[in-house]
Image: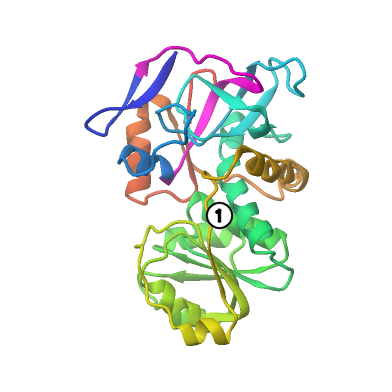
């Protein structure tokens, strides 16, 4: 089969590799489409290796049809599914533990379904399981026009929250507003900590972190939760412990990829129960910036590196529709 390998020069090259061998308790998926995520870029850079047992090539989510499944499985060959992966999605086939496989939501194409697992699982994990967001609260999402940002905005609004977000351009501001954001801060022209003070935060989902984090904590409501899910803006900040203690702020780190399959499976079952029906109705939507053939994986990564996307970038294989 073909898969996108990382070359010694840190480039992406579609290559011939052995077909994967099935394992007990796993589903083999013929991949029709896969999502591109920033973790894939980090993997190419040698900074984010896949967990043990997963292929060396990138790909944290996919959609396709079941090639084979255990006799006791709820899935059968030919079923349309999507899956959350530890890696390996940039390939014609992938072997996935059954707990990480979901039926595709109704009324979804393969390209749309491939845009769902990673961002909505991350959104649900941090907004619901960690953030415990309630109706009427205010949620802050950094990088609101990213694939994850647009998912978090939609899910937070679905939960009844007010949403404040940051973007880097007016085009991206439009995408964030279209997803439901109530307040959009252009971080290139506005002072983010000062703007946040006008809209005190209950739960923050922060993929940037960096120096600005400590200043932003001043805008938290009492008992607020600041959840760091990535450090794209840097790994260090200064925090006023007086503010931290006086406001009873919780500062928590959270990643999805490092969790056990059992933990991920619980999150995915919650997705099926709460998010999938809303996706089928069109209440929640995968937001796709571009769809590109798998042969253009290098160009797709460049789009994310240059922050030119507003929504997900999806790679497709020839059989995709």
Q: Is residue 165 left or right of residue 66?
A: left
Task: Count the numbered circles shown.
Answer: 1
Residue 70: percent from left, percent from top: 71, 17
The residue at the point 77 percent across, 24 percent down is 74
Query: Relative to 155, is 216 on the left or the right?
Result: left
Residue under numbered circle 1: 150
Instruction: Decide if residue 321 is in sight here.
Output: no
Using residue 120 as the reference point, say whether residue 170 is left or right of it: left
In reply to whether residue 46 is colored magenta, the answer given is no
Vertical placement of residue 296 versus 256, above or below? above
Hey, which quadrant is residue 296 in on the image? Answer: top left
* Point 53% across, 28% down: residue: 33
Q: State the image coordinates of residue 222 (x, y, percent, origin top left).
A: 62, 82
Q: Secondary structure at mark 1?
A: helix
Magenta residues (range): 15-38
- Quadrant location of the N terminus? top left
């Amino acid at each position: 089969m073909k898969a996108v390998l990382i070359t010694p020069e840190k480039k992406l090259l579609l290559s011939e590799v052995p077909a994967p061998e099935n394992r007990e308790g796993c589903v083999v998926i013929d991949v029709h489409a896969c999502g591109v995520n920033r973790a894939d870029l980090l993997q190419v850079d040698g900074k984010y290796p896949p967990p043990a047992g997963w292929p060396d090539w990138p790909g944290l989510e996919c959609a396709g049809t079941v090639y084979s499944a255990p006799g006791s499985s709820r899935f059968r060959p030919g079923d349309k599914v999507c899956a959350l992966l530890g890696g390996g999605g940039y390939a014609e086939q992938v072997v996935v533990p059954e707990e990480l496989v979901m039926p595709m939501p109704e009324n979804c194409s393969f390209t749309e379904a491939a845009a769902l697992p990673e961002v909505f699982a991350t959104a649900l994990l941090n907004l619901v399981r960690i953030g415990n967001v309630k109706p009427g609260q205010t949620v802050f999402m950094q990088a609101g026009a990213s694939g994850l940002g647009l998912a978090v905005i939609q899910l937070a609004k679905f939960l009844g929250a007010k949403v404040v977000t940051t973007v880097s351009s007016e085009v991206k501001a439009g995408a964030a507003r279209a997803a439901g954001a109530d307040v959009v801060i252009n971080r290139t022209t506005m002072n983010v900590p000062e703007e946040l003070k006008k809209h005190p935060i209950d739960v923050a989902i922060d993929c940037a972190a960096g120096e600005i984090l400590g200043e932003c904590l001043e805008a938290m409501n009492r008992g607020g939760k600041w959840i760091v899910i990535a450090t794209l803006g840097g790994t260090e900040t200064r925090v006023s412990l007086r503010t931290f203690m006086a406001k009873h702020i919780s500062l928590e780190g959270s990643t999805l990829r490092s969790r056990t399959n059992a933990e991920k499976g619980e999150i995915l079952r919650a997705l099926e129960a709460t998010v999938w029906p809303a996706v089928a109705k069109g209440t929640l939507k995968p937001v796709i910036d571009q769809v590109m053939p798998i042969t253009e994986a290098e160009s797709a990564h460049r789009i994310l590196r240059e922050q030119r996307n507003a929504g997900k970038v999806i790679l497709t294989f020839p059989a995709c529709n």
